[in-house]
Image (cartoon, coloured by chain):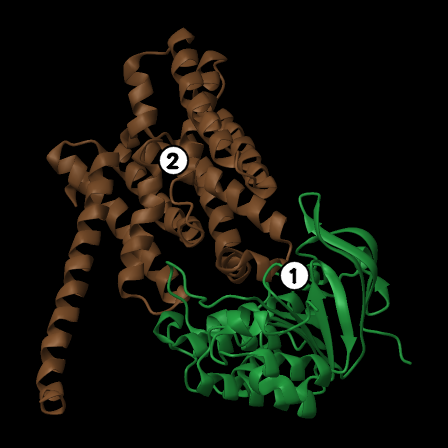
Amino acid sequence: MSQPLIRLSAGVIGYAGIPAVSGVDLELHRSEVIAVLGANGSGKSTLVKGILGLADLMSGVLELFGEPASAFRDRARIGYVPQRHTVGGIVPSNVDEVVASGRLGRQRRFRRATASDRHAVAHAIEVVGLTGFERRPITELSGGQQRRVLIARALAGEPEVLVMDEPLAGVDLANQGYLASTLKHLVTHEGTTILLVAHELGPVQSLVTRGVVMRDGSVEYDGPLDEPHRRWTIHDPHPHSPDRQVEGLGLSG
Amino acid sequence: MEFLQYEFMQRAMLAALMVGLAAPAVGISIVQRRLALIGDGLGHIALTGVAVGLLTSRSPVAVALVAAVVGGVVVELIRDRGRTSGDIALAILFYGGIAGGVVIISQSPGGTPGNLNAYLFGAITTTTRGDLLVFAALTVVVLLLCLGLRRELFAVSNDEEFARAAGLPVLGLNLLLSVLTATTVVLSMRVVGLLLISALMVVPVATATLVSRSFRSTLVLSMAIGLLVSTSGVAASYYADTPSGGTIVLLAIGLFAVFAVAVALREFVRRRQAVPSQRPAQS
C-alpha cells in the first residue's frame, strides 16, 4: 500500500495534560473518505484536533505526509473545516474575505495576492455554489450557506486532505444535500481525500469508504461502514433527532 | 483655520492626524477579538513607564513605550496560556500599572498632580518637535504592519483555531498585535491621554461597523472617522478651550450616536415600506 497521508499510531491526545483519546491507531490513504463516528464525548473531535495540531499529542507517533508532525510545516496541504455554525463576528466581513483567509497558508507575508491566489479563492467559492455572493456580508447568509463558506475557506488553500468536524450538524436537509454533492464533486473530480467527524452521516453515507467508530476515547470499530450503519438505522426510533441517533448507534452491546 | 498659525497648534494637529489614523487601524483587530478594553489596560501599564521616566529624568515617552510593550507581551503570553486565572492576572497587571504609576510619580522631582493629569487625559499642545518625530516614526511602523498584515491579522482575529490549523504563525501575530497596541497607546498618550486611549481605538471602528459590509470598508471608514474626530476635536478644543482628549472622544461618541440613529431610521423606513407589499399575502 502507498504511504499514508496521515498515520497515527498508539496516539494519546488531550488538553492540558488530560487525555481524551488514548491508544488510537489511524491511517488515512489518498482518495479515502473516512468518517469518524461516535457519541458526544467519545473523543472523535479531539482525535482530529490532535491530527491538526490543535490538541496535544501526549504520546504516540503522528506522521503527516510521511513526516513527523512536529517537523511538518506545510499545513496548507490539510484543509480544516471547524465545527461552527456561524462565522460572523462584530466586525463585518464578506464571503470573499473569509474564503481568502483560507489561502494565507499558501501566501507569503506582505505580498499581494497573485492571479493563482485569486483563482483558487474564486474556484473554492464556485465549488460550494456561492458564486455571485462574494460581496455578501457573512451575517446575511443562512446557517447552511455559512457552512459552505467555511468549506470554501478550507478549499482555498487547495488542500490534498480535507478534515471536517461535523459538516452536516445543524444544517437543514436541502443544504445537507447540497453539501453532500459538493463533497462528491471534491472526491470524484478533484481527488480530495476526506476525514470527517460526524454524528450522523445522512446523505454523505454513500461517499464514505471507511468508518471509524469511537467510544470512550478509543477506536471501537474500523472498517467498512455497512455494519454499524445498519444497526444505527435499525435502532433509531427518531430519525430527525441527532442525539437519539447516537443512542441508537447500538454499539454498547 | 486661524488657529493653525500657532506652531504648537500645528504640532497638535499633526499629532492628532497620526493618532487618528493609527488608533483605528490597530483597533479593528482588537474589536474583532472582543478585547476592546486591552488598550485601556496597556495604558495603565504605560503610566508606570511614564512615572519611571519622570523619576529617572529619562524620556517618559520612551520608558512608557518599553513598559507598554513589555506589558503587552506579558498579557498576550498570559492569554495564550489561557486558563481561568488569565482574567485575574490581567486585572492585577493593569491595576498594578496604575498604582505603581501614581506612587512613583509622587516621588519624582517634577511629579505634580498637573503632570499626572497631562498623561492621564492628554496635553496635546505640549507636544514638542522631538515628540512629533518619534510619533511620526511610530505611526509609520504601526500603519505599515497593520495594513501590510491586515489579512493575516483578520484571519487570526476571525478564527484563531483555523489560523493555527492553516499554519499561520498565530502566537507571533498575536504578540505583534499586542506590541502594536502598546505602541499606539504610547503614541496616543499626548493626544487623548492614557485613560481615553481605548476610545479612539474602539469607537471609530464601532461606528464603521454600523454601515460597513466588509472588513476592508470597515478598516477604511474607521480610519477616516478616526482622522476626522481627532483633527476636528483638536480644532474644537482650541475654540471652546476644552481638553483635547475628552473633546475628541466626545466627538467620536457623538458621531457613533448619529450613525446608530441613522441606521435605526433606515431600518424603520425599510420596514414601513415592506409592510404594504406583504398585506395581500397575509389577508
Mark 1: few/some/many CA within 10 Å (<14, 14-19, 20+): some
* Label 2, residues with CA under 10 Å away: few <14, some 14-19, many ≥20: many
**Mark carried by residue A42:** 1
Q: Is residue A246 above or below residue A123?
A: above
Q: Which chain is green?
A: A
Disc 2 residue type (three-letter): Asp
Quadrant in the picture for residue B43? top left
- Between B131 and B5, which is closer to the camera in this rendering? B131
Q: Is residue A51 visible?
A: yes
Tell me the chain of label 1. Answer: A
Residue B234 in sight from this viewpoint: no
Q: What hue represents chain B? A: brown
Residue at the spot 37% in from the left edge and 70% down from the top edge: A139
Residue at 85% in and 64% down: A67
Kindly identify the residue that appears in the image at 33 percent across and 19 percent down.
Answer: B116
Q: Chain of mark 2?
A: B
Instruction: State which quarter of the image contains the C terminus of chain B.
Output: bottom left
> For the point 43% across and 31% down, which residue is it?
B130
Give the residue pinned by disc 2: B40
Residue A59 place in picture, x, y as percent: 81, 51
